[in-house]
Image (tube, rainbow, N blue to C red):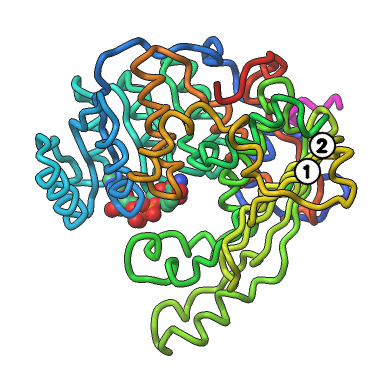
């Protein structure tokens, strides 16, 4: 203890690793260090900070690939939005995007993408209020940081960041610049997710106890294609083992449980199955001699984590994109008086009339509990929108917040808390499923009661 060459950080670190004979790679070692000693406060909290009111939202888009170009239609369909600038390093995607402007009879945006860092020039423009970022994961943090440092609010595709360090950087830059960094988690705006949120808020399920959620989606074909996500989304499977895509399941679950609004993710444990799916897929589909045969897949096909919240609730969170299976986000929420689960959606609420403990359809509750956004905009959403209309509702609501001067539904603290199970699951898996504590990105403000998704 008296050795001046041993820092407090070293002592904490060795205490945390005591009893484990595990060597962590540099990213996980940094993650562990940050869990023990979070970075210094950068500025006042961004919780509840309202956007400035504006008549029109001038939008910049970085990344017009599969997702960014798909979402362009949603942005264009909402009143009061002008897309003033786009950026992509793929000339083909820029050309496809410009054709969409032409077809819609809209003024062509300014174009960036000459180099990998040309997005910095888009961020400097003075005719951009909000920047939507839909690029590969490793670009999310530097792009959001550039946006905020240039005075722009931004919305990040999911997950917002893939490291603990990246999550803290988003929080600190948002606090320092007073700019919002939203997570564009479309699943929070799903019709059933929003209806169930209303049921929960009205206490129909009683006191909440347990949730289950996932991203279980067979992406073997997509991540093996020679384009789009096939270029970058298979690579993490050769480098790390954990849950790379936690937010589609966890965002709606956090809203049900009021995470960062009275409850908090406390700690998690994570374990992975063997990694076999991509090997079998390659065996069946990839010609011998293809560079993919040099890849070694190390991510377990099914990663399962359990999160404990401050109120003692439990959440089972899964990730599996490398085996044949129907799509499933599970979306289960259990309370003291009932349970909802999705895929297919069904509900059981204890009542004298339902003695046989049979699930009912959610349709019965629609008239009373449908979310106001779906009541007013559902028809338009279904007509325009991807993913059953949730993409449109998310964009519509984001624009509404920006124009009316509301605080965003999903702020930088949500972005960090929902994304951080990515690196925390890697850390827990690497340490033999040891419990790993969540950082408190809100620095104590998670206890403030506030409404999830107004
Ligand atoms: N919310 C959803 O439902 C949903 C669905 C699909 C994808 N996503 C997310 O959207 C993001 C993008 O995924 P995608 O499927 O569109 O991938 P994609 O590969 O199809 O598109 C990414 C685009 O980013 C461009 N890009 C890469 N580096 C760049 C740089 N430095 N500057 C400018 N452009 C750059 C690429 O050229 C490409 O066009 C990811 O974060 C992904 O997880 C979300």
Residue occupying image coordinates x 19% and y 48%: 97
Please tell me which residue lies in front, 187 or 23. Answer: 187
Relative to residue 276, is residue 34 depicted above or below? above
Residue linked to disc 1: 339
Give the left or right position of residue 80, taking residue 283 as reference: left
Disc 1 residue crowd, few under 14, some 14–19, many 20+, Cα 10 Å: many
Q: Residue at x 41, y 88 (%)?
A: 287
Q: CA distance from mark 2 to mark 1?
A: 6 Å
The quarter of the rendered structure image containing the N terminus is: top right
The answer to the question of whether label 2 and label 1 lie on touching residues, with beta carbons closer than 8 A, is yes
State whether label 2 is within 8 Å of ligand 1.
no
Q: Position of residue 364 (x, y in %)?
A: 65, 41
Disc 2 marks which residue?
A: 335
Q: Residues within 10 Å of mark 2 (few under 14, many from 20)?
A: some
Q: Which quadrant is the C terminus positioned in?
A: top right
For label 1, being within 8 Å of ligand 1 is answered no
Residue 44: quarter of image? top right
Which segment is the magenta one? 1-9
Relative image position of residue 286 (x, y in whole percent): 43, 84
Determine whether, in the image, residue 393 is placed left or right of residue 108.
Answer: right
Query: How far across and down, in percent of the image, does residue 230 sit?
Result: 39, 65
């Amino acid at each position: 203890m008296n050795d001046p060459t041993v820092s407090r950080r070293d002592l904490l670190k060795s205490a945390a690793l005591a009893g484990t004979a595990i060597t962590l790679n540099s990213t996980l070692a940094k993650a562990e260090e940050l869990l023990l000693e979070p970075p210094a406060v950068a500025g006042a909290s961004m919780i509840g900070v309202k956007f400035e009111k504006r008549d029109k939202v001038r939008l910049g888009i970085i990344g017009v690939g599969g997702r960014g170009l798909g979402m362009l239609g949603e942005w264009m369909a909402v009143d009061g939005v002008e897309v003033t600038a786009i950026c992509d390093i793929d000339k083909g995607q820029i050309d496809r995007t410009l054709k969409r402007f032409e077809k819609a009879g809209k003024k062509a945006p300014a174009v960036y993408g000459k180099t990998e860092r040309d997005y910095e020039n888009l961020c400097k423009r003075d005719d951009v209020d909000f920047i939507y970022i839909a690029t590969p994961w490793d670009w999310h943090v530097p792009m959001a940081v550039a946006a905020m440092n240039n005075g722009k609010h931004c919305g990040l595709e999911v997950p917002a960041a893939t490291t603990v360090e990246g999550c803290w950087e988003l929080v600190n830059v948002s606090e320092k610049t007073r700019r919002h960094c939203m997570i564009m988690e479309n699943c929070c705006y799903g019709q059933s997710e929003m209806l169930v949120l209303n049921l929960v808020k009205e206490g129909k399920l009683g006191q909440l106890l347990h949730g289950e959620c996932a991203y279980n989606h067979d992406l073997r074909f997509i991540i093996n294609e020679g384009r789009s996500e096939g270029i970058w989304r298979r690579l993490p499977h050769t480098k790390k083992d954990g849950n790379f895509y936690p937010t589609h399941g966890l965002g709606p679950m956090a809203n049900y449980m009021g995470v960062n609004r009275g409850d908090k993710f406390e700690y998690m444990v994570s374990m992975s199955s063997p990694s076999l799916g991509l090997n079998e897929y390659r065996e069946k589909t990839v010609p011998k001699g293809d560079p993919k045969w040099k890849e070694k897949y190390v991510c377990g096909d099914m990663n399962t984590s359990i999160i404990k919240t401050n109120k003692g609730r439990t959440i089972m969170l899964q990730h599996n994109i490398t085996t044949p299976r129907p799509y499933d986000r599970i979306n289960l929420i259990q309370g003291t008086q009932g349970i909802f689960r999705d895929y297919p959606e069904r509900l059981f609420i204890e009542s004298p009339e339902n003695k046989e403990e049979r699930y009912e359809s959610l349709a019965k509750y629609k008239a009373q509990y449908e979310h106001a956004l779906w009541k007013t905009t559902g028809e338009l959403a279904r007509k325009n929108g991807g993913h059953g209309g949730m993409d449109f509702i998310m964009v519509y609501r984001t624009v509404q917040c920006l124009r009316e001067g509301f605080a965003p539904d999903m702020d930088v603290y949500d972005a960090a808390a929902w994304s951080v199970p990515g690196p925390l699951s890697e850390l827990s898996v690497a340490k033999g499923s040891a419990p790993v504590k969540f950082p408190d990105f809100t620095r104590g403000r998670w206890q403030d009661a506030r409404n999830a998704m107004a």
